[in-house]
Amino acid sequence: MIYIDETKKKEIDAKRFKSLTRRQFKLGLLEAGLLDQIDNSIAAIDDAQTRARIQIEYTEATEFHRTSDSVAYMCQLLGLTNEQVDQMWEQALTL
């Protein structure tokens, strides 16, 4: 698993990002042109246990937390920087 370092967690927490609903999270990915890519990226995870875990997190979560390990992992799959994720998160909060 990929984890956000403690310094970044504190920075993110300081910004007090609210959680996103499933709808906001997916619309944010859609607006960024990443909706198809996340499905393909999850399906391509080599480790079956990790793939199943991230798939469950992505498809079954009702809300997404900016500092969660699963969100960090998905962002890494998409090749996003923390700054890009912060910007996308802020935009998704308005949807």
Image: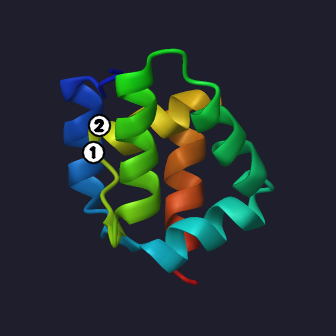
Q: Residue at x 43, y 23 (%)?
A: 48
In which image quadrant can residue 8 be found?
Answer: top left
Q: Nearer the viewer, residue 41 or 63?
A: 41
Q: Quadrant of residue 7?
A: top left
Classify 30 as above or below 81: below
**Name of the residue lying farthest toward the bottom:** 95
x, y percent for residue 37: 74, 43
Mark seen at residue 69? 2
Q: How many labels does the image show?
A: 2
Residue at image point 63% right, 66% down: 28
Kind of residue at badge 1: Ser
**Helix, strand or loop at disc 1?**
loop
Whether residue 80 is visible to the viewer of this picture, yes or no, is no
Q: Within the image, what quadrant is residue 94 found in?
A: bottom right
Determine the residue positioned at 54% across, 15% down. 46
Badge 1 is on which residue?
68
Distance of label 2 from label 1 (alpha carbons)? 4 Å
Q: Could you say where residue 5 lies in the image, as x and y percent from the top left?
A: 26, 23
Farthest residue to the right: give it. 33
Q: Residue furthest top?
A: 46
Q: Residue at x 37, y 63 (%)?
A: 60
- Please report contact status of discs 2 and 1: CB closer than 8 Å, yes or no: yes
